[in-house]
Image (spheres, rainbow, N blue to C red):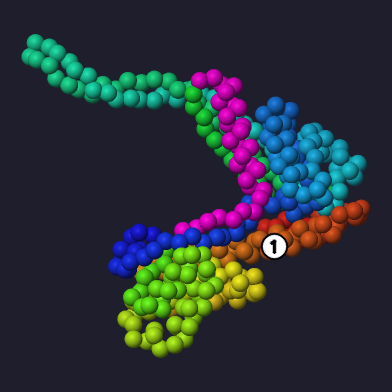
Amino acid sequence: MLPALCVLGCASRTVVGTVQVPATVPLRTFPHILVASGHQPSEILLASELVAHLQSARSDQDVRRVSRDQLEPMRQRGEIPVASVVVLVELDARSRTRTRFSTRPETVCGPTGCFTRNRTDSYDVPTLFAQTRITVFEGPSARVLQRLSLDVTEEGRGYDRMRDRAVRRLAVRLKNLVDARVEQVRVRLLDVNTPAVEQALLEMEEGRWREGRVRLERFVRGDGLSPLSSSDRARVYYDLAMARRFDPVSLERDPERHFQAAEAPLQRAIRLDPAPLYDEALRALRRHRSHFVVLQEQEQAAEHNYQLRGQTTIPPPETLPTPPPGYGQ
């Protein structure tokens, strides 16, 4: 953002806002989860770590680890419930040796005297590349819902130790994928040499986004905005957009109207002063909005899937709609 601020040529301050980010792999939307793996100890460890993590969240969720060899027989016997999801965890670990180079100065002396030169030496480093592949299936129909992979690289001595470190790192990343989370984002507020605006920014600096918004709304509706230059008006509209974006009250009351209200002053700021910061803020706002939409879809999918729990009739796969990001059956 710093280049944008330089373009604006104005003072600024940095505050912190919060954004809810949906789960990348929304397994928790299903009441029944089967985590399958092969027979490698590392695959079993990864699957077991995921099962333990999922079990810690809610007591009404049935989470089990099974061997991948059990899945098809279980499906044929009708032992995979309607409202279930299957997660297949696969691990591929490959070791190799990478050549590294180091350069150091050395002094060389001869008949004509001494001089310093750089000497380059090569050495071999044991390296392990580990990748886990995650495939999510709808339980009864085996329809693929999602595929993704995670990979890490370890260097050092001892294949077993490198493998253990790689599996631990992959387990942490895998567990993080299944949870929605709250992220703190750094937000720039732009100073405007007007007491009313400055007071509003102070409120927002203290985390009182609602109070800062009220002050800015009052200022924009009054007579204080018209005497300002176009660039200053753009800064005020930008600050108002940030206040509206992070106002928790309006987000809870009417999310759709909340994001529309936040985008409107940003569009005005861009028309008054097409600075890069305003375009960047607009993109961030739209990402925020898309996160919220997916969160809602995941909540709706969970409600729908939990209502299916206990049913015995499995709908034909061809009758099932394309699942939304929330994995609704």
216 falls in the magenta region: no
Assess disc 1: are there few (<14), some (14-19) or many (≥20) residues with their C-alpha within 10 Å of its C-alpha.
Answer: some
160 falls in the magenta region: yes
**The C terminus sits in image quarter:** bottom right
Residue in view at x 85 percent, y 52 percent? 82
Q: Residue tagged by mark 1? A: 297
Image coordinates of residue 22 in percent, x first then y, are 63, 56
The answer to whether residue 250 is left or right of residue 57 is left
Residue in view at x 90 percent, y 53 percent? 310
Magenta-colored segment: predominant secondary structure? helix
Please identify the quarter of the rendering in which residue 121 is found. top left
Residue in view at x 36 percent, y 78 percent? 194
Q: Nearer the viewer, residue 302 or 253?
A: 253
**The N terminus sits in image quarter:** bottom left
111 w.r.t. 291: above or below: above
Q: Secondary structure at mark 1?
A: helix
Identity of the residue furthest to the left in this view: 112
> Over which residues does the magenta segment extend?
157-186
Residue 283 in sight here: no
Q: Amino acid at mark 1?
A: Glu
Image coordinates of residue 53 in percent, x first then y, are 71, 42
Image coordinates of residue 30 in percent, x first then y, are 78, 52
